[in-house]
Amino acid sequence: MRRRERADRIREQLEALYGQPAIPLDHTDPFTLLVAVLLSAQTTDKKVNQITPELFRRAPTPAAMAALTVEEIRELIREVGLAPQKAKALKRTGELLVEVHGSVVPQTFEELEALPGVGHKTASVVMCQAFGFPAFPVDTHIHRLATRWRLTSGKNVETTEADLKRLFPIESWNRLHLQILYFGR
């Protein structure tokens, strides 16, 4: 079976299994989604969802996040992996959102990726889930499955993202990345 035929079959099966999957990270707006995705690196979404209610109660806005000390943030997120680095990144991200972006989460990859702790995958999740911009975030689950399904060479996540974008219609990317994510779990 050719790669494109395999991709079409996989997409049909995932659509039947997961239809309209929910975003697995609890959030209320683009800022809280950005924070949750930033926290999710090296940690499960379940753990992020356990710790973010108190974090979001204390820091529901960029200004409130910037007003907390790094130590306060670290204490609130201590149960997630890389908490010391993430606490510093969250504090500085809150400051930059206030100082540079008027307390609004930017809607470009370049501006998002310029924020501390925000890489391409995090920016992609925010762009597609918060703003509806077509993106195909690739995490370890998606990379592993795309390689196993022979949809990509599996060299790296950048190659996997480019291969998946070529194989699947642009209007399916935002939903499909969640469907693959759920299947991979």
Image (cartoon, rainbow, N blue to C red):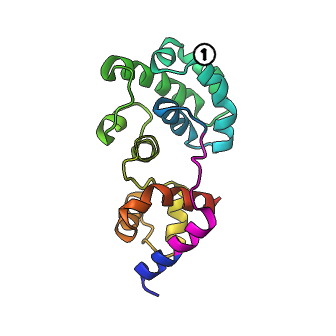
Q: Quadrant of residue 151?
A: bottom left
Q: Can residue 100 be seen? A: yes
**Is residue 14 rendered magenta in the image?**
yes
Question: Residue, x 38% and y 18% (percent of image)?
Answer: 98
What are the residue bounds of the magenta stretch? 10-25
* In the rendered image, the vertical position of residue 95 relative to residue 47, given as above or below: above
Q: What amino acid does circle 1 point to?
A: Glu
Q: Can residue 161 be seen? A: no
Instruction: Provide residue 66's location: percent of width, then percent of height.
Output: 47, 16
Instruction: Provide residue 178's location: percent of width, then percent of height.
Output: 54, 55
- The quadrant of the rendering that contains the C terminus is bottom right
Q: Quadrant of residue 26?
A: top right
Instruction: Provide residue 107's location: percent of width, then percent of height.
Output: 34, 37
* In the rendered image, the vertical position of residue 92 relative to residue 142, given as above or below: above
The foreground one among 113 and 168 is 168
* In the rendered image, the vertical position of residue 115 relative to residue 156, given as above or below: above
* In the rendered image, the vertical position of residue 111 relative to residue 168, given as above or below: above
Label 1 Cα neighbours within 10 Å, binned few <14 / some 14-19 / many ≥20: some
The foreground one among 25 and 28 is 28
Instruction: Provide residue 80's location: percent of width, then percent of height.
Output: 64, 35
Q: Quadrant of residue 87?
A: top right
Q: Decide if residue 102 is on the left or right side of residue 51.
A: left
Figure label count:
1
Mark 1, residue position: 72
Q: Decide if residue 109 is on the left or right side of residue 43.
A: left
Mark 1: secondary structure: helix
**Is residue 117 rendered magenta in the image?**
no
